[in-house]
Image (spheres, helix red, strand yellow):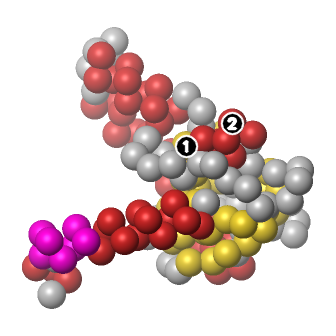
Amino acid sequence: MGLHQNRLDGKGRVSIPAAFRTVLRQRAADGETPALVLRSSHKYKCIEGWAAADYEKMSAKFDTLEDFSNERDDLTLLFFGDATPIVPDKEGRLVLPEMMVRYANLTDAVYFVGTRNTFEIWEPSAHEARLAQARANAINHRLPAMLQ
């Protein structure tokens, strides 16, 4: 959960917020180094970060799609085509793939945004615009009953 601002250095390195590192450690198998999968979001101009175990669980859902169908081809390309497994260094930093940095229009300041079982890395003004859109959608379409 939460919103955290960090800096992206000239080498494409950024520190994962401490709260997110804690969750990643909890999701890693006992004694394993917390691994992530990064991918370009298929919905927004941001980078998604998944605990490797959660990404593996999500990817199992693709087994239900018909082999060689256009739907499966499109979805697997979107979800796995640029997905990058990565292990943060001992200081909790990771190097963002250059292609993803360009996709998300990241420069020096980035927002890490918690999204329940994943996190997103945003260019700050793009995130603020997306948040305003989400708020407007919630007001215009009323929140689901579960949140009232």
Q: Is residue 84 magenta?
A: no
Instruction: Report the residue at 88% width, 53% height from top.
Output: 10
Q: Mark 1 highlights which residue?
A: 40
Question: In this view of the protein, can residue 76 be seen by the observer?
Answer: yes
Q: Residues within 10 Å of mark 1 (few under 14, many from 20)?
A: many
Answer with left or right where residue 98 lies relative to residue 11. Answer: left
Q: Residue at x 41, y 63 (%)?
A: 130
Give me the C-alpha separation between circle 2 and circle 1. 9 Å
> Which residue appears farthest toward the top when viewing the image?
68
Residue 89 x, y percent position in the rendering: 86, 60
Residue 122 coordinates in the image, percent (x, y): 58, 60
Q: Is residue 15 left or right of residue 144?
A: right
User: Callout 2: helix, strand or loop?
Assistant: helix
- Residue 67 picture location, percent across and down: 32, 16
**Residue 138 is inside the magenta segment:** yes
Q: Residues within 10 Å of mark 2 (few under 14, many from 20)?
A: few
Name which residue type carries label 2.
Answer: Met
Q: Is residue 115 visible?
A: no
Tell me: residue 114, above or below residue 19.
above
Look at the image and tell me in which quarter the C terminus lies.
bottom left
Residue underneath mark 2:
99
The numbered dot on residue 57 is none
The region drawn magenta spans 136-142
* Quarter where residue 103 is shown: top right
- Above or below for 69 versus 88: above
Q: Main secondary structure of the magenta part?
A: helix
Task: Tell whether label 1 touches label 2 (CB within 8 Å).
Answer: yes
